[in-house]
Amino acid sequence: MDLDILKEKLFFMPDATRGAVRYLTTKQLKETGTQAIVTNTLHLLIHPGVDVIRKLGGIKKMMGWDGIVFTDSGGFQVFSLLHSKKWKGKVHENGATFKSPKEGNTYELTPETSIDIQMAIGSDVLVCLDDCRDTNLTQKEAEQSVDRTLKWALRCKSHFESEYGGTKKTGKLLTAVVQGANFSKLREQCAKELVKIGFDGYNFGGYVVNEYGELVVDEMTAVIENIPKDTIRYAMGVGKPEDILRAAKIGYNLFDTVLVTRNARHGTLYTSQGVIRIKNSEMGLDQGAVDPNCNCECCRNYSRAYLHHMLKNNEATALTLLTIHNLTYYQDLIKGLSQV
RNA sequence: GCAGAGGUGGCGGAGCGGUCAAACGCAUCGGACUGUAAAUCCGACUCCUUCGGGAUACACUGGUUCAAAUCCAGUCCUCUGCA
């Protein structure tokens, strides 16, 4: 597989956190035009676990997926689960130690184990473990986060090379996450330091929207100006269609967000005529397609009224069809951008 | 016909003298969601309001009380037993 296209073209990657894009079969996923997906190191570590994944031949074999697989390092999950106090655990110099609330098992995620897990999953593009934190950090906290992220990135790269032979031997790519919260200067410094270490891609991490829901364009610009053009430029968690357009305009080429699939499940749909909410009463008798300009399985065959009825009555088929639509919309959006 | 139980907001169902415009669930109507613990979460849900409040409300009619969805009497319904 030629992974170098990830450095050139635009891609939208749906999140298949636990090795499945919710409610889609791999065939349906493919039919949306999806070429790459993002799976999650931390979630797969807990279920089904590294040993099982290894025995089953990796996530691609499990899914029957022949496209590209990214593995997110687990840095964001450590943040969102530990820092929101939903899980017990701690982030320390060596990584994160935490307990899953269901089984109570203790796990340790270090730069090295994160790489090991991502290798076991059978990822094509690995992400270095990063110290992800909240947006509203003090300068000092942001500096600590950058400092730790840089140290961990270096450890990830060393481990990837010494243990597995790096890109040369594995054919896999390694990317690093740029932190620095909402301090553009820190973002810039972090990007520069990571470039010195040298990666196949640089991912804009942390929170990508501010408290008003606006894309943090200044910080994103500070980063993109300091990383090479011929690398992966991944805007993690971006975003709404308009945010993807904005991020693409300033130079990012890879995107992922849960909004596509989650909003589909919650009834918020993206269309060429703007956002619609399929559960709203006005959809009850609307016999038109979700998006008349869309050619997905959902829009070709079913009316808004029918989908409205199914979603309101908890018919899971609606979740599948609406996910197909939203994801197709995003892939078409990316296709349109690529042709500009 | 006799004996028991009961009638509460769109529905189910709490409350059994004051803090009740009435818990909770469902339905309904909005909204949110940005490296997914999310088929989730939040809000509204009698009418009017200058958002401080105000006016009607717990089958119906009357009564007791400073005060009634809550107590009493009658009326009308419903359900369960027995004839």
Image: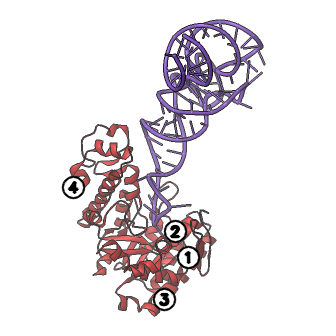
Chain letter, disc 1 residue: A
Find numbered disc 3 in the image and state the secondary structure of the residue it sits on. Answer: helix
Q: Is label 1 in contact with label 2 (beta carbons under 8 Å)? A: no
Q: What residue is pinned by disc 4?
A: A295
Q: Nearer the viewer, mark 1 or mark 2?
A: 2
Chain letter, disc 2 residue: A
In the image, the chain rendered in purple is B
Q: Residues within 10 Å of mark 4 (few under 14, many from 20)?
A: some
Q: Is label 4 in contact with label 2 (beta carbons under 8 Å)? A: no
Using the numbered discs, state the Cα–Cα distance from disc 2 to disc 3 in whole angstroms: 22 Å
Give amino acid for label 3.
His
Mark 4 or 2, nearer chain start: 2
Q: Nearer the viewer, mark 3 or mark 1?
A: 3
Describe the colour scheme in one phrase: by chain
Give amino acid for label 4.
Asn
Q: Position of residue A302 (x, y in %)?
A: 24, 48
Q: What residue is pinned by disc 2?
A: A77
Q: Residue at x 24, y 40 (%)?
A: A287
